[in-house]
Image (spheres, rainbow, N blue to C red):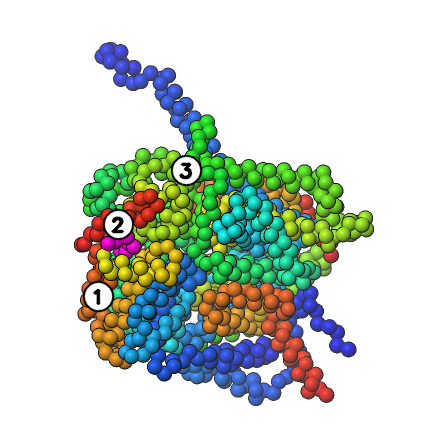
Amino acid sequence: MDRVQGRVENPPLASTKLETFGREVRALWFFLQIMLGGLSIGAIYSLIGLGFSMLWSAMGIVNFAHGEFAMLGAFLGVTLMKMAGLPFYASFPLTAVLIGLFSLLVDRAVLRPLRNRDLLYIVIATLGLSIFLQNGAILVWGAGGMLFPTVFGAQPLQIGGLITTPQTLSVLGIGILLMLGLQVFLAQTKIGFCLRAAVQSPETASLMGIETRFTNALTFFLAALLAAIAGMFIAPIVYVTPDMGVLIGLKGFSAAVVGGYGNMLGAMVGGIIIGAAETLGAQYLSSAYKDVFAFLAMFIVLLVSPNGLFGKRKIDRT
Amino acid sequence: MLKTNLVKIAICIAGLVVGFNFSGGTAWGQINIGVSGPFSGGSAILGEYLNQGYAIALEEVPKIWGKTVKLIKEDDAGDPGKAIAVITKLLTKDNVPVLLGPHHSGCGLAVMPTVDKYNIAWFSGTLSPKLTEKGSKSYFRARSSDANYTRAIAMFAVNTLKVAKVGVMNDSSEYGVSGADAFIVNLEKLGQKPVIREVYHEGDRDFTAQLSKIKVAGIDTLYLHGLEVSFGLIVKQARSLGITIPMIGTSAFGTPKYVEVAEGAAENTYFTNTFLASEPTPKVDSFVKRWRTKYKGDPEAHCAAGYDEYKMAAQAMELAGANASREKIRDAARKMTYEGLQGTYKFDEKGEGCKSMAIGMVKDGKLVFIQRVNF
Amino acid sequence: MEPPSATSTASPIRDEGNLKPRLIIGILILACLLLPLLVEQPYYLYLINLTGIHAILILGLNLLVGFTGMVSLGHAGFFAIGAYLSTKIVMNLHLPWILGLLGGGTGALVGGLILGIPTNRMKDLTLSLVTLGFGISIYRVLMSWTSFTGGAIGITDVPPASLLGFSFKEAAASFYLIYGILGILLAVAASMAHMRVGRALLAIREDEVAASAMGINTRYYRIMAFAMSAFYCGCAGSLFAHYIGFVSPDSFTFHHSITFVSMVVVGGMGSVAGSFLGAAGLTLILEYFRTFSQYQLVLYGLSVILFVVFLPNGLAGLAEGIERRVSKLFQK
C-alpha cells in the first residue's frame, strides 16, 4: 500500500481473502448442484443395472433389450393414465406388474430356447429383440412420443441454496427405496432367501427343494419390474419416446459392469459413478462428449479392476 | 475348400440378381411421385406430419396429367447413406418424374450429385442455407431458408424485445449448427454478439450441464436451434432451474409438440415459422379446418410444408404439360409463381422461393400469431 | 447314422473336398464377372456393391466374433476410422487412393490395437460393453470434432477410388474393384483359416483355458485377431467412402454396429463364405421388407431373433446342410 500519496491503491488483504472464500463456496454449491443431477440420473442407471446384474448372477444371461422394459413401462403407464383415466398411484403398480409379466413372455419366447448357447447368440438375439420392441412401440404409440404428466410437480424448490424439483427428488427417492427394498426382500423374506440360494448355486438349491424354474422366473420378473418403475419415474423429465430405453439400457449395463457384474451393491455404486462421471464431465469439460465420459469412466474402472469394483471371478459352471 | 467357398458366393450373387426382381411397376393410368422422408428413426414424427400434409394435398389434387397419383414413399431414416440408396431406387427403378424430399439437410447434401445427374426437380422443406449455397440446379426449397428464419427472429428480438445479451444453444446436427450460425450472423448484423454458446445432442434428455452454465452467464434471452421435443425438455428443465428469461427460436418452437412437452413452461417463448395455424388468412383457415376433420389438434408447419411440396410439384408438372420430361418439369418450376400456405413462392436459380416469415409467441398454451414479415 | 449336427455351437468350417463339376464353377464365375453388364438397374448394382463392401467388413468382424469368440459391438467405429482417414489422406494430403486404402486400414488397425491390448484380460460381456462404448464414443467424436471430421455434415465430394490413373467412377468399375479386393481378402482369410492361425483362434473360442494349456499363446492371438479384424474394417471403410462419395457420422452409428454383428450371425459364425452370405442375406432381407413400409424394422428385428434361435449356424450352415443332403442323395 502506498501511504505516501495518502491514498490506498490496493484493497486490504483481508477483503481479497473473503472474496476468494465466497467464490469457493459458490463453486462448491455449484458442484453440489451438479452432483445432485448426477446422482439422480445415476439412480436410474443403478435401477437398470440392478436388473442386469440379477439376470446375470441368477441365470447367466444378458438381455440387451432390458432398457426397452423401462420404455414400455413409461408408455404403458402413460396409456393407462390417459386412456383409462387411472390416477398415477393406480397405474404405477399395475404397469410395473404388467411389464413384469410381459418380461416372462419374452423370456419364454426368446431366451429360454437360447439357454445353453454361447453368449454371443443371446447378445444378438436380445439386440434383435430391442429393435423389434422399439419399432413395435412406434407402431403402437406412434413415433411422436407422449408426455408423461409430472406427478410430483415441476415447480422449482430451493433446498439450502440448491435448486431442484420434486420430480427429480422423487427419482432419487424411488431409487433408494427400491434398492433398500430389494435388499430387505432378499435378506429377510423366505422367497428372497430362496432366490439368493438359487443364485449362488442352482444345483445345491434345487437339491434343497428350491424350484429353480420358479426363482428364475421371479428374478426375471423383478428385474423387469425395476426397469419399468425406473422408466415411469424418469419419464416426466425426459419425455416418453420409443428410443428412450436405448442409452439408458446401455449405461445401466455399464453401471452393472463397473460395479462388478452380478453384484447388486456394485450395480448401485456403478450407477452413481457413471451418472456422476458423465454429468461432471459434461459440466466441467465439454457437454458434447457427455456419453464418452460415461463410457470412459467405465473403461478406466475396468482397466484397474477387470471384474468390476466388487466383482468376483466368474466360475465357469459348464 | 477355397473352391466351395467361391461356389457359395457365386450362387449367392446369382441369387441376388434373381431375387432382386421384385418389380415396382406402374399401373396404367397412374403416375408415381417419389417421396423420401424420415419415416423411421429419431425424426419419424416429421414423417408423420409430412404424410398428413400429403394426404390433404392429395385430396385436393388427386390427378396430374389426367392420371391418378400414387406417392411412393421411401424411408431414409435421416441417414444420408440410406437417402442415396432410396433416391437411386426412386430415380432409376421407379422412374419418377419428380421428387419430394429428402427432408433432412444432411441427406439433401448427400443426394445432390445424384439428383443433379438425373436432372430431376426435387421439392423439399429442408432448412439449411448450405443447400442453396452449394448450388444444385434441381433443388426447390419448399419452405424458407434458415437464413430468413433467423433474420426475422433476430430482428424481432433486438428491435421489439429489446434484448442486449443473447445466449445460443443448438444441437450438434447439420441443421442445428448451420441454423445457429445463421442466427449469429444476423445478430452480428444488428451489432450484437452471443454471450455464450452451448451444444447438445439431439436425443439427449438431460441438459443440466449446459443450463447451469447458461444460468450464470447473465443473458436476457436464450436462442435455441434444434428440434421440438428437445426444446420442450430444455425449457422445462431451464424453468425448474430458475431460469426465467424469454426463449426465442425458429420453427421448432412454433409447434404444438413443443407446447405439449414443455407442459406450461412454454410461456414467454417467441418464434418464427413459415406457417402458423392461427394466422388469420382464408387459405390457412380452410386448410386448418380441413385438417381438423381428419386429425386431432392443430396442424404443424411440416404438414403445411408437405402440402405445399406436393401442390408445387403438381403445378409444375401441369405447367410443363402432359408426360413432360424431368428437365421440362424442372424448368417450369423455375419459372412459375406458387401461392402456398407458407407464402408466395418464386424460385431463383439456387432454389430459394419464399422470403416471408410469420412471427408468433406462446400465450396461455397456444401458438398466437403476431405478425408476418416480408423480406 | 449320421451324427446330429451341432446346434449349440457353430461348427468350424469344413472343406468337404466334394468336387463339383468344374463346368458349373466355371459358368458361375463367368456369370459373376459379367454381372455388372447383366444387371441394368443402377439401384440393384448399388446394393450389390454395398453388399460387397459390407462383406469385407463382416469378414473382418467374423475373424473376431466367429473365430475367436470375442463379441464386438462397436465395429462401426473401425469402419468410420477407415472411411474418414482415407478421405483425409486423399483429399487433404493429395495422395493416391491406394495409400488412402492402406492408411485407412492401418489407422483402424492401430485403433484395434489400442482397444485390443488393454481389454485383453476382459471377459466376453465386459468386452462387448467396452467395444460398444468405443463405437458410441467414435460416433460422438465424429459429430463433435468439427474441424477434422466436418461434424454432423461430414465431408462431401469425396473423390472416387483410382488406381494408376484409372478412376473408378462408374458403378460397374467399382463392382470389379470391390469384389476384386473382396476376393483377395477372402482367399487370405480362407487359407489362414486352415493354417495354424485359424485353428488357434477357433480353439480359443471353444475353450480358452484348454487352448492356453495346449501351448497356444492366447494373448497374442486375441490381440492379433482384434488388429486384423480392425484392418479389414478400415479397408472396407475406405472403399465405402470413395464409393458413396461422402462420409458423415450417421453412417456409423450403434445401429450399424448391431447390423454388422447380425450379419455375422446370419451368415454363420466362423465361416469364411458365411461372411458374404450374411452381408448378402441381411441386405436382401432388409430390401424385401421395404415393401412392408412401416413394418420393415419390426420384421427385421424379428428375423434376427428367428435366425439366432432356429439357424444358429447361419446361412453357411444351412448351405452345408443342404450340400450334405444333396451329396448323400447322389451317393445312393
Residue at left offset 37%, top offset 42%: B265
The chain containing the residue under callout 1 comes to: B
Residue B220 lies left or right of residue C208; in this view the side is left
Q: Name the front one of labels 3 and 2.
A: 2
Q: Amino acid at mark 1?
A: Tyr
**Quadrant where the N terminus of chain B is found in the figure:** bottom right
The chain containing the residue under callout 3 comes to: B
Q: Is residue C170 visible?
A: no
Q: Do discs 2 and 1 belong to a common subunit?
A: yes
Q: Amino acid at mark 2?
A: Phe
Checking the image for residue B369, the label placed there is: 2
The secondary structure type at the circle numbered 2 is: strand
Count of number-bearing discs:
3
Checking the image for residue A293, the label placed there is: none
Residue receiving disc 3: B240
Residue at left offset 58%, top offset 70%: C267
Among the two numbered marks 1 and 3 on one chain, the one whose residue lies closer to the N terminus? 3
**Quadrant where the C terminus of chain B is found in the figure:** bottom left
Residue at left offset 50%, top offset 65%: C297
Residue A155 lies in the magenta stretch: no
Q: Main secondary structure of the magenta part?
A: loop
Label 2 – label 1 distance at C-alpha? 23 Å
Residue receiving disc 1: B338
Residue C217 lies left or right of residue C179; in this view the side is right
Position of B66 relative to B358 (above/below)? below
* Of the pair C223 and B32, the residue shown nearer to us: B32
Q: Which residues are magenta?
A: B274-280
Where is residue C294 drawn, in percent x and y? Answer: 46, 66
Corner quadrant of residue C264: bottom right
Q: Amino acid at mark 3?
A: Ser
Among the two numbered marks 2 and 1 on one chain, the one whose residue lies closer to the N terminus? 1
The chain containing the residue under callout 2 comes to: B
